[in-house]
Structures are given as C-alpha cells and as structure tokens.
Image: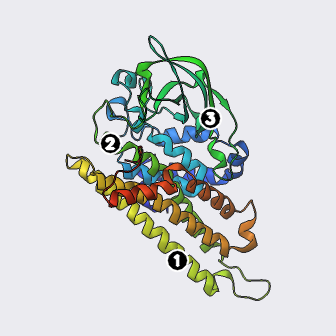
Amino acid sequence: MTQYVDKEQWGGRERFDALLDDIRARREEIEALRHLPKDIIDQFKSIGVYRAMVPARFGGDEKSPAEFLRMVEAISTADGSAGWVASFGMSPAYLAALPESTLEEVWRESPDVVFAGGIFPPQPAERTERGFKVNGRWKFASGCMGASLCGVGILPEEQGALPRMAVMPRSQVQIDPTWNMIGMVGTGSHDLVVEKIEVPEEWTFVRGGKPTIDGSFFSYPSLSFAAQVLSVTTLGMAREALDIVRNSVKGRKSITGAPNLGEREYAQIAIAKAEARVQSARHFFYMSTDDAWRAIEQGGVPSRDQVNLLRLSTTHLTHECADAIQSLYRISGMNGADNAHPLSRILRDSQLCTQHAFMGEVTWKNAGAIFFGHDPLPGYL
C-alpha cells in the first residue's frame, strides 16, 4: 500500500520505487545473509531514513511521526526484515536524552548515523571517575551489522528505575551472530559483546529519558514511538499479503476444472474479512498517532489517555495484521506453504512481531488498567 507514503519526501518516487524493487528481488539473499546488505543500508541513508527524525540544526529533516511510520510501512511491503531495520531510523527519539554536547558529536559529520542497541538483559556496570566500565553480552541488536554507533543496557543505580544505555563506536563492540529465529531472519538481531570498555557518563542516557534538545518530535512519547515503528512493519506485510493473494488468481485456471481461488466463496469471504481487519486497525493506529501529534502541535503534550491509545492501537495493529496474514496463508493452499513463496516468509515474519515485548500480552493488561483508573507497569507510558 505504498500510495500512503509521499515518496517525493523520501528521495523521489523513482528512487523509492527502485529501492522497493531491489529489496523484493533480493529477499532470498537477505535471508541467507541474516542481515541487510551494506548497499541497502546506503540506500536507506540516501532516501533519508536515518536523518528523518534528526533536528534541522544537525542537518536532519524533522519529519513527523506519521510520515516516518508510513515510510516504514511502505518498505515493509517489500520485506519485513528491511522494514524492521529501517524502523531504527527512529533512534533520535532515544539519543535525544544524551547531553546536547554529546549529540553535537554524534551528528557532527553527518545526520545519517546508523544506531543499533541491545538493551536486554541490562548488565551491571562499575562506576569510574569518568563514567562506567561496561562489560557483558546483550541480545536482539537489530540492524547492528550496518551500524556505526551501538548502545548497550546497563542496570540502573536506583532500584525500579529504567535501564541506562551506554553508547560507543561500533569498533568497540563485538557482534556474535546468534540470531536464529522463525521470522525476521534478515534483521541481523545478533548479540552484542563488550569487554571492559569505559564509557564516559556523557555518552550514557536513560532509555525514555527527558530529551535535552528542543523540537516538536521530542515531545512525542519515545517508548510509544519505539513500539509503533516495529508494529507498523506488520501493516506493510499485511498489505503485501493481500496484494499477493489478489494477483495470484489472475488468468489462472484449475487443472482439475474447479473454480480458481478468486471464484471460491470461502476465499472471497476470507479476503474481505482480512481487508476489513487491516484497514480498521490501520485507521485506529494512525488516528491515535495524529491525535497525539495534534496535542503537541497545539503547544501541549499528549495526555495519559492519548498515550495509552498509542500503545493499545500499536498492539492491536500487530495482532490484527498477523491474524489477517494467517487467514490469507490458509486459503493459499500448498503454493503458499512453500518456503520460497513470499506468503510463507510474510507469515513467519508477522508471527515473530507478535512475540515482541512491546506488543505482548502484558500491553493489553496495561491498557485495561488505565481504563479502570489504575497505573500500568513501569515502561508502558
């Protein structure tokens, strides 16, 4: 559903479409590598993925949350792993909690900085005169193979506080290629290993902490946005799945003489229900995004209820899209079951999304708690 993204804002229609075509043609290569090739990361840089949310004073484009989300949605139609890796162009939402002087160093040479982080499990870090001595192993550092800057999680000094992230050059981090999951194989979400590296305190920040620089985007809830950019990959994949099933019946006749798939009543019902689920979830998702952004544009901040709807619509989007994809897979027969078939890959990738903590079962619980006037668990709002 790439018509939802303004391609002129992302390098122009011709370049954006060429990028999607390139990714589609290289899905098997991406899965075999288990990460995105460097030239695709370079194409992401060229269309503005990594400078999208960087302030203009540092050479960035200052896109709105919805503009960024639509871009990730569009890339995800070509490949879920590619969309997932592109989603980490949202990193300024986190990095903005670094001191301003550190941010000047981060973006001194270019706003197109690729950041990857592995925050869990947070590791204890020894306090030093300058900062922290960091040592340990962290999981799920999506996109780390193409990163120039990495962050790892360290335990907070106060019990119950959010984890701190220590940021360092990629050269100080070892990547252990452990990523071996059922889906999103091409995200390269490997382990990061750091051995006794001293990180100055000014190169650490609290994930979800208060930004040190001004800008409308930095009033948008960063933890909510971090969940949204991942969830929206399932939306792009669901659109692709719908298009694949529609296009698969064109000009096809059954060798048995039975009606082709598009003429079968159960398939017509299934695709109608899938379309309704995807469109409805999409509307709730972007409506919640626009409502929160409108509050910021009017000089305020999103209310507790608005942030709750951001999180709820994000979880809802992931599960509705994953369920719609599964229903389309079921009607595809043995063709869709082939591992080389795009529906098979989309199914695997979408199911992996439902396992992420940002869209897990506990988020339903947190949303419900707020509806009843109770506090959610830490890290939700």
Q: Which disc is residue 273 wearing?
A: 1
Element class at badge 3: helix
Q: Which residue corresponds to mark 3?
A: 145
14 or 366, nearer to the observer? 366
Three-letter residue code for mark 1:
Lys
Q: Secondary structure at mark 2?
A: helix
Instruction: Give residue 131's position: percent from left, percent from top.
Output: 45, 16
Considering only order in the chain, which callout, 2 or 1, is on the residue closer to the N terminus?
Answer: 2
226 or 41: nearer the viewer: 226
Q: Amino acid at mark 3?
A: Met
Indicate which disc, 1 or 3, sits on the residue closer to the N terminus: 3
Above or below, comparing residue 151 to residue 44 in the picture: above
Residue 45, x across and y down, in percent = 50, 38
Residue 381 appears left or right of 358: left
Lateral position of residue 316 relative to residue 25, left or right: left
- As drawn, the label of residue 217 is 2
Q: Mark 3 and mark 2: span between their CA atoms?
A: 27 Å
Q: Residue 333, image x and y in percent?
A: 72, 74
